[in-house]
C-alpha cells in the first residue's frame, strides 16, 4: 500500500513501463521525468498541474494498491486510449468501452489488482466489480489528464466520456 505523500522511485516507474511495453525507449506521452511525475507533453495548466481535459475537471487518486501496480494500470489504460484514438478517431469513449463488455475479463491484466483490492476489503463479488470499475474510471481520467493531447470531457451514459480533440500545437 502506498504511503501518502511518498512518490515511487522514478526508476521503478520507468522499469514497470518498459516491462509492459517491452521496449527500452518509452513514447513521450508516457515518459517518466526525474521528478517521478508521469505527466508529459504539452497540455493545459491548472493550479501548477498539467491538464489535457477540456473543460478542466477534478481528477482523484486511487488508493489501496501499490504504486508499481498503479503505474502498470495507467500504462495499460494509456495503451487502450492510444488504440481507441487510432482506430476510432473522433468517437467518444468511456472506461467501459476500453475495459468493459467483451474486455471485462481482467484476470492476467494489471487491472485485476483493483478487483482484488475490493475483494480483500471484504466486498461481495458484484460490489467489488462495481468499485473496481469506479477506480478504473478515475485512473483513466488521470491518464487522459496527463496525456500530451487534449480530450473533450462529456457524458457517456451515466459515466464520463472523452473524445480526442486533435488540436495540439
Image (cartoon, rainbow, N blue to C red):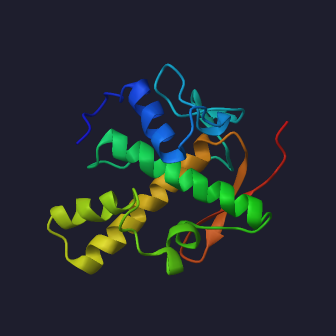
In the rendered image of this protein, does residue 21 appear above or below residue 159? Answer: above
Q: Which residue is drawn at 80% across and 64% down?
A: 90
Count of numbered tags: 0
**Residue found farthest to the left:** 122
The image shows residue 95 at horizontal and vertical percentages of: 54, 66
In the rendered image of this protein, does residue 125 appear above or below residue 75? Answer: below
**Viewer-side residue, 59 vs 123:** 123
Q: Which residue is drawn at 85% across and 36% down?
A: 169
Q: Name the image quarter holding residue 12.
A: top left
Task: Report the quarter where the N terminus lies.
Answer: top left
Q: Residue at x 59, y 38 (%)?
A: 30
The image shows residue 77 at horizontal and vertical percentages of: 53, 55
Residue 158 shows in the view: yes
**Residue found farthest to the top:** 34
The image shows residue 87 at horizontal and vertical percentages of: 75, 65
The image shows residue 55 at horizontal and vertical percentages of: 68, 50
Q: Is residue 64 left or right of residue 44?
A: left
In the rendered image of this protein, does residue 60 appear above or below residue 90? Answer: above
Residue 153 shows in the view: no
**Viewer-side residue, 86 vs 128:** 86
Q: In this view, does 21 lie to the left or right of 40?
A: left
**Viewer-side residue, 151 vs 40:** 40
Q: In this view, does 153 lie to the left or right of 31?
A: right
In the rendered image of this protein, does residue 6 appear above or below residue 43? Answer: above
Q: Which residue is drawn at 30% across and 65% down?
A: 115
Amino acid at each position: 500500500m502506498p504511503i501518502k505523500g511518498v512518490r515511487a522511485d522514478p526508476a521503478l516507474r520507468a522499469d514497470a513501463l518498459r516491462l509492459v511495453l517491452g521496449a527500452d525507449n518509452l513514447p513521450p506521452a508516457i515518459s517518466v521525468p526525474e521528478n517521478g511525475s508521469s505527466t508529459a507533453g504539452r497540455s493545459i495548466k491548472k493550479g501548477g498541474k498539467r491538464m489535457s481535459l477540456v473543460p478542466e475537471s477534478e481528477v482523484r487518486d486511487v488508493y489501496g494498491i501499490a504504486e508499481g501496480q498503479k503505474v502498470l494500470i495507467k500504462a495499460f489504460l494509456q495503451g487502450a486510449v492510444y488504440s481507441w484514438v487510432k482506430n476510432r478517431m473522433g468517437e467518444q469513449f468511456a472506461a467501459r468501452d476500453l475495459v468493459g463488455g467483451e474486455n471485462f475479463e481482467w484476470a492476467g491484466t494489471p487491472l485485476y489488482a483493483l478487483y482484488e483490492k475490493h475483494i480483500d476489503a471484504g466486498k461481495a463479488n458484484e460490489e467489488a466489480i462495481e468499485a473496481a470499475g469506479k477506480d478504473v474510471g478515475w485512473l483513466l481520467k488521470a491518464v487522459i489528464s496527463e496525456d500530451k493531447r487534449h480530450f473533450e470531457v462529456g457524458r457517456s451514459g451515466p459515466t464520463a466520456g472523452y473524445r480526442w480533440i486533435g488540436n495540439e500545437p
